[in-house]
Image: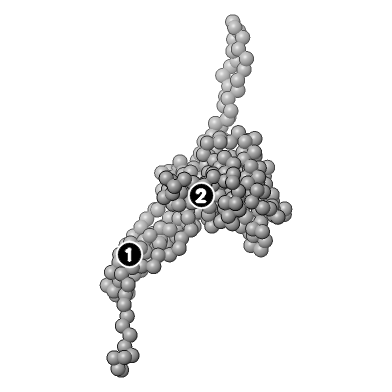
Amino acid sequence: MGLESFIPEVWSARLLANLHKAQVYGQPAVTSMDYDGDIREFGDTVRINAIGPVSVSDYTRNTDIDAPETLDDSQTVLAIDQAKYFNFQIDDADRAQQRPRVMDAAMAEAAYAVSDAADQHIAALYSAIDAGSFVGSDASPKTGYDASDVYELLVDLKVILDERNVPTEGRFCVIPPFLHGYLLKDDRFVRAGTAATDRTLRNGEVGQAAGFRMLMSNNVPYAAGPARFKVIAGHPMGWTYASQIRKVEAYRPERRFADAVKGIHLYGAKVVRPTALACLVINAT
C-alpha cells in the first residue's frame, strides 16, 4: 500500500453532545415535590392527608357556642409505581483513545434519559384533570385559530382556574413549540427579560401570558393523526411527583475489558387536586 492511499484516523478531543428536550413538568415550579424524601423502594406508597373545610357561625353575646366541629379528613395515596434503569459500558480501548471524560458524558446522558421518561409520565396525567376544567376535547379540539385566538384560549384556562379559587401566584402553562410561535406574534405575550435568560432557558420558561408562567416543552402529550395536543395549565398544588435515584453501581463486566455503570430511578406522580389544573385540547393546524 502506497503512502498516497494511507488516510490516518484522528480521534477528536471533543464529544458531540446530543440534542436534549427541556425537562419541564418534573420541576418544583410546575409540580409539587413535597414527598421526595418519603420513598425507599419500588412499590412504596406515600399517604397524603388532607383536612376538610372549617365552618364559621354567627356569634351571639351571652350565648353558648356550638359543640366543636369534627373535621372531615381524607387520604390520597401516591404510589411509587415507576422504575426505570440504565446499564451501559465503555470499553477500555475507547477510553484510552478518547481523551475527554467519556464516563462523565455517558453518566450525563443516563441522567437525562431517566428524567425525560419521568417528565413524559407526569405530562400524561392530564386525563385525571377534572372534566369541567377542559377547553376543547378529543372529539372537538380547538382548530382554525390565529395568534390572537391562542391568547384568548389561555384566558379561557385562566377563567376556569379563577372560578375554582386556584391561587394566582405560581400558575404555569406548558405549551408545545408551535403554540409558542403563535404567541410570539401577539403583542400581549410578554417574553422573559435578558436578566433571567440563563434560568429560563434551563427550565423551559419562555415568558408570561394571561397570568401564567409560560413554559415550552416537546413532551406536551398529543394523539397521533390529527395531533390533538393537551396543553396543561394550573398550579403546582394540583399534582405531586416524588422520585429517587435508588441505586447506582459501577462494575467490571466479567467477560469484558470495560467499565460499566447501572442505576435505577424510582418515581411516582399523581393528580391530587383535579380542579387546580386545566387542560386545552388543540390541534396543530
Residue 254 can be seen in this image: no
Q: Measured from the top left, where is residue 198 in percent x and y?
A: 41, 50
Q: Mark 2 points at which residue?
A: 206
Task: Identify the residue at image location x=67%, y=46%.
Answer: 135
* Quadrant location of the C terminus in the rendered image: bottom right
Q: Can residue 66 be seen in this view?
A: yes
- Residue 22 point in image, percent of width and height: 47, 55
Q: As drawn, is 212 to the left or to the right of 39?
A: right
Disc 2 from disc 1: Cα separation: 33 Å
Asked which quadrant contains residue 99, the reply is bottom left
Which residue is found at the position 60% from the left and 33% from the top? 165
- Mark whose residue sits in front, 2 or 1: 2
Outermost residue toward the front? 187
Compared across the picture, whether 105 is left or right of 152 comes to left
Query: Residue at position x 53%, y 52% from top?
Result: 216
Q: Up-down: is 171 above or below 81?
A: above
Report the residue that reaches farthest toward the top. Answer: 62
Up/down of 145 relative to 274, above or below: below
Q: Where is residue 9 in the image (x, y as percent from the top left)?
A: 32, 80
138 shown above or below 274: below
Q: Earlier in the sequence, mark 2 or mark 1?
A: 1
Q: Pick out the residue farthest to the bottom.
A: 1
Per the image, label 1 sits on a secondary structure element best described as: helix
Q: Which mark is residue 103?
A: 1
Q: How crowded is mark 1: few (under 14 residues within 10 Å), some or many (20 or more)?
A: some
